[in-house]
Image: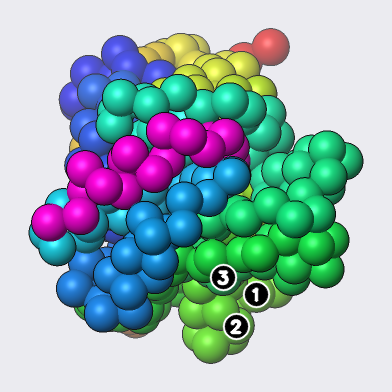
Amino acid sequence: MTDAGEPLTGCVMVITADRRKRELASALERRGASVRHAAALSTIPHLDDALLIENTRAVIANPPDVVVATTGIGFRGWVEAADAAGLAEDLLAAMRGARLIARGPKARGAIQQQGLEADWVAESETAAELRDYLLAEGVDGLRIAVQHHGNGSDGLDEAFTTAGATVQSLVVYGWGAPTDPVPHRQMIAAAADGCVDAVLFTSAPGASAWLAGVEEVGVLAPIAARAATGDLVLACVGPVTAAPLIEAGLTAHWPDRWRLGALVRELVKHYSENTAAIPTPDGGLVMRATSAILDGRVLPLTPTGLEILRALAAARGNVLTREQLGELLPGAQAGPHAVEAAINRLRENAGSRALVRTVVKRGYALAVTA
């Protein structure tokens, strides 16, 4: 058996993001999780985009009254693109005379990295809050430069233009199909089949792309069912990221603070507080998607042994007949002797003869204690 001292031990977790995946995976693995990477989309930088450079020159030539930074990666990418074109110093000089508005702390952090300070930050990290704030102040006659993320303008350009502002759009990166779509589809199928404990999302476009994959594979119904019961946790960095999942009728979870670290802590809290162990003579039994944990230790079970133990655990001490258990055995090996042999292997691998009870002339049951 393997020691399972960490709260996420035995959990299989899928990261759907391409950016910062190693940082997130490392934090999860330190807490015991097994991590799979299956990006739902890819980020396409526009560092050499002639239009971006042209628009940057326009910002420098006519310095804006307001600069809106919608994402950290986008704002940094904009300055990097300007630097590659020899325009970074001029761009930052143009920004120093403007009010800097950030759609959340990541955008504020990117602004600060350039030696600037954000004048206002949207607490909800939504474009809607940012839009409403500026419109309430009034933008008529102002020149506004808006750095957009890969999912479009979120209606900011149109709203500001309608209110009388002159808007300069800067599209720094875009979204594309995943570089390797095979893991994306495979992990969606695995989540539907019960082989994944949690799927993690760090952006609304990523959640939307994952949903598109779910519909393409045709497994929305089993995904929704597993998410509703809590067998599959759809963990999002915040409510904006969760919105596409919720709109599709899926149950999603997110932390109070919308950061990767908080997301990891939310998962630790969920699996620490919401996983009820089944009491047995050998300690609490917890079933994960691809493993079983007994008294804090991962059992070295075969796939067949895991399925048998899962069925016995679901019965919660009620008897399962040899015929019922035989249906879980591969091929034609479903007779009484094969079932008995499988139960003996399960007991041996669990290190306990008492974990599974033999009920004479009836079948087998998990030894559940009061």
Could you give the CA–CA distance between mark 2 and mark 3, rounded to whole angstroms?
A: 23 Å
Q: Is residue 335 above or below residue 292?
A: below
One can see residue 266 in this view? yes
Say whether residue 90 is left or right of residue 310. Answer: left
* Residue position for label 3: 152
Name the image quarter holding residue 300.
top left
Q: How many marks?
A: 3
x and y percent of residue 347 in the render?
31, 34
One can see residue 348 in this view? no
Kind of residue sitting beneath label 3:
Gly
Front-most of 110 and 306?
Answer: 110
Residue found at x 65% / y 74%: 220
* Residue position for label 1: 220
x and y percent of residue 343 in the render?
36, 46
Could you give the CA–CA distance between mark 3 and mark 1, rounded to whole angstroms?
A: 26 Å
> Any mark on residue 195, and which?
none
- Judged from this view, the residue extending furthest toward the front is 61
Q: Which residues are magenta?
A: 86-103
Say whether residue 209 is left or right of residue 128. Answer: left
Kind of residue sitting beneath label 2:
Glu
Residue found at x 83% / y 68%: 162
Name the image quarter holding residue 137.
top right
* Residue position for label 2: 215
